[in-house]
């Protein structure tokens, strides 16, 4: 399904002019080689583009970058082999620029830098290959630019051009830039764009597709046509910042390097029955996705690739925003509005375009959307999973996840990468090296299945071990929110967004009781008056103040044990609270009365008995009860609770 889907996406990209045909490749070109009709080099034209940008210090600087041109694609080869239309300077000129050292003059040399005779003679072999390729492929053409190209190959003598002023003028660019040919007086028409050159290249590709005498013909598993089989599949883009992260050299999606994968006497790619034509198309489509910023994300050391089958880039950008980070195309308000519209109908059938409010004119909800997870694995790329869903259904599942994650009404949507970060200790010096697999959680979100239990266990562990000082504001609502989501989906519970005073679950009530005891401690140790922050008054007419941060609260000392075994800790904390309450009664009798009322109401729900060891889900209920109750202290009372 994957290769077939990529092959179809290639056709969409071609129709939208987003990529070049499979026989061509976008190449960075820096200079035009200007030839006279007789094939003489009469100049070099810099065709690079430039733009003015601001650097880190705020100063305007000019950035120069090569121009993209569509060039006949060069086949993979580890040996000296010239291309149909050559762009590499070593092949074209047979020369290399060597800067002067110790006062010596700069020079052009026919020898490459190297220690062995083979390394030094590489340029000579490359130029000979270039000349042979030009005579073979262009010798019968009659167009002026093609004839000049042939004459250049026949008359250019590298040993006699070591002082060439045009090549000396570009200095080190000769070794690292790429070149195209044009005719004097006609810089608008480059060699690769000339009709005869394109027609000849098309015939050569057709010949390759029909098969040579030594090629294996098979029925392509993708297109169904009988075509030459691809023995070696093209590599995927890999590197820092783009492509497949942490991959090896020239990684490919289909690879039969070990002999154990071979069968029935077939060699390498013959075992896959994928034609050269289909291989070129799917690899070009996948490489486009790996380069496009809106079509891939890096999460948990893996590369997540996604695309809309109709080529709608707005679908891709919206998913990028949800998976990874905000974008310029979708503001936080638009994303929030769109997901809120979906949340209201997350369990009410298929999502349609009209439900998407601010983004309804951009996205297509009824198209197939693909999500592919790739991981590096030596020279072959490991496909961890492939998901295909209607884009509307995918958004519905994501909206359901966001709904389950909410613990207050105005909470912004949470990126999946942010959830991953909360599963790792904030004190970790290398969070990217965490060995926790994110695959199962990611799939649970996009497919609407139960969340993996290990995620709940890991999040509870983080809540028990990490101190308040280590947590960001985001952590304080993502962590309990995710625990709430697990209880809703996995335990099939109905849980309110805010504190539920009618919830009598012992674990939930114990968590709320712990929050009450912590509040009493904080109130009793507050010195003087601070800026008032309205809290609930529970009918007393009193407003509380946000407590000053203490060096060590009962949460720092007892929370981890209380979550696991309330019966072992809660009686001790209640006894400790009596001392805090006495001090509070002396200094703030109004607050003491209010806190004592809340404490009594909470204790009454337990009937004087605390639960013992809690299982995983009860520990989650304890944490959620604590989070709900403690947050409720710092909300205005609307008499709705």
Image (spheres, rainbow, N blue to C red):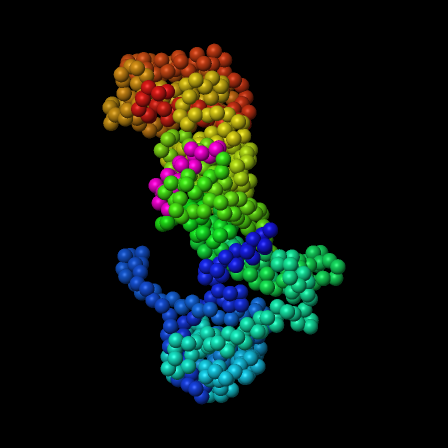
Q: Is residue 339 magenta?
A: yes
Q: Position of residue 236 (x, y in %)?
A: 54, 59
> Which residue is drawn at the image coordinates 53% and 27% (left, top)?
492
360 or 579: nearer the eye?
360
For this orientation, the residue located farthest to the right is: 264
636 or 361: nearer the eye?
361
Q: Position of residue 586 (x, y in %)?
A: 28, 13
- Compared with residue 211, is residue 468 higher up or lower down, i.e. above or below? above
- Compared with residue 529, is residue 37 higher up or lower down, i.e. above or below? below
User: From where the camera sits, is residue 170 visible?
Assistant: no
Taking the image as shown, residue 15 lies to the left or right of residue 385, namely left
> Which residue is drawn at the image coordinates 30% and 24% (left, top)?
636
522 or 474: nearer the eye?
474
Magenta segment, prevailing SS (helix, strand or loop): helix
Q: Position of residue 600 (x, y in %)?
A: 39, 12
Q: Is residue 545 magenta?
A: no
User: From where the camera sits, is residue 611 visible?
Assistant: yes
The quarter of the image holding the C terminus is: top left
- Compared with residue 280, is residue 501 higher up or lower down, i.e. above or below? above
> Which residue is drawn at the image coordinates 58% and 52% (left, top)?
2
137 or 629: nearer the eye?
137
* Magenta-highlighted residues: 330-348
> Which residue is drawn at the image coordinates 53% and 19% (left, top)?
612
Number of residue marks: 0
Q: Position of residue 400 (x, y in %)?
A: 47, 35
């Amino acid at each position: 399904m994957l290769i077939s889907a990529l092959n179809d996406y290639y056709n969409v990209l071609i129709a939208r002019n987003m990529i070049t045909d499979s026989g061509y490749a976008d190449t960075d070109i820096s200079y035009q080689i200007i030839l006279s009709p007789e094939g003489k080099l009469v100049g070099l034209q810099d065709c690079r583009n430039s733009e003015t940008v601001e650097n880190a210090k705020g100063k305007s600087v000019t950035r120069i970058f090569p121009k993209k041109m569509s060039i006949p694609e060069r086949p993979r080869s580890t040996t000296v082999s010239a291309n149909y239309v050559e762009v590499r300077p070593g092949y074209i000129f047979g020369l290399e620029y060597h800067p002067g050292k110790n006062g010596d003059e700069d020079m052009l040399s026919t020898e490459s830098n190297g220690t062995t005779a083979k390394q030094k003679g590489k340029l000579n072999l490359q130029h000979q290959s270039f000349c042979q390729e030009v005579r073979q492929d262009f010798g019968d053409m009659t167009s002026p630019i093609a004839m000049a190209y042939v004459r250049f190959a026949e008359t250019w003598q590298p040993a006699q051009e070591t002082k060439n002023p045009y090549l000396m003028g570009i200095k080190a660019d000769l070794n690292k830039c790429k070149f195209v040919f044009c005719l004097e007086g006609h810089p608008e028409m480059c060699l690769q764009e000339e009709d005869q050159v394109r027609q000849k290249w098309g015939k050569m590709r057709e010949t390759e597709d029909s098969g040579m005498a030594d090629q294996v013909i098979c029925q392509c598993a993708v297109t169904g046509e009988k075509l030459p089989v691809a023995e070696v599949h093209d590599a995927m883009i890999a590197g820092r910042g783009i492509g497949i992260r942490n991959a090896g050299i020239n990684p490919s999606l289909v690879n039969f390097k070990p002999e154990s994968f071979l069968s029935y006497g077939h060699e390498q790619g013959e075992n896959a029955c994928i034609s050269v034509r289909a291989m070129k198309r799917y690899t070009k489509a996948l490489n486009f996705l790996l380069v496009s910023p809106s079509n891939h994300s890096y999460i948990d050391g893996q590369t997540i690739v996604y695309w809309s089958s109709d080529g709608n880039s707005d679908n891709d950008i919206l998913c990028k925003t949800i998976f990874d980070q905000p974008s310029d195309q979708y503001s936080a308000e638009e994303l929030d509005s769109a997901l809120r519209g979906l949340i209201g109908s997350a369990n009410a059938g298929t999502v349609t375009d009209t439900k998407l409010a601010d983004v309804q004119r951009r996205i297509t909800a009824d198209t197939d959307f693909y999500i592919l997870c790739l991981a590096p694995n030596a020279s072959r790329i490991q496909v961890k999973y492939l998901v295909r869903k209607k884009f509307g259904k995918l958004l519905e599942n994501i909206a359901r996840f966001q709904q389950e994650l909410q613990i207050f009404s105005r909470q912004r949507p949470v990126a999946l990468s942010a959830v991953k970060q909360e599963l790792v200790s904030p004190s970790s010096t290398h969070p990217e090296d965490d060995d926790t697999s994110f695959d199962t959680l990611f799939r649970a979100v996009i497919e609407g299945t139960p969340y993996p239990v290990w995620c709940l266990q890991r999040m509870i562990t983080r809540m028990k071990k990490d101190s308040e000082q280590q947590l960001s504001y985001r952590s304080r609502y993502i962590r309990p929110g995710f625990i709430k989501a697990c209880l809703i989906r996995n335990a099939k519970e109905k849980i309110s967004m805010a504190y539920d005073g009618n919830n009598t679950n012992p674990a939930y009530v114990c968590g709320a009781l712990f929050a009450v005891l912590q509040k009493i401690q904080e109130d009793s140790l507050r010195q003087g008056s601070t800026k008032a922050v309205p809290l609930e008054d529970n009918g007393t007419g009193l407003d509380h103040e946000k407590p000053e941060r203490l060096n060590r609260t009962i949460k720092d000392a007892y929370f981890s044990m209380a979550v696991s075994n309330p019966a072992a800790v809660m009686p001790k904390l209640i006894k400790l609270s009596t001392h805090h309450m006495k001090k509070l009664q002396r200094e703030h009798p109004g607050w003491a009365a209010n806190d004592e009322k809340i404490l009594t109401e909470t204790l009454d729900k337990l009937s004087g008995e605390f639960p013992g060891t809690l299982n995983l889900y009860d520990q989650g209920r304890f944490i959620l009860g604590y989070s709900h109750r403690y947050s409720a202290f710092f909300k205005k009372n609307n008499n709705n609770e």
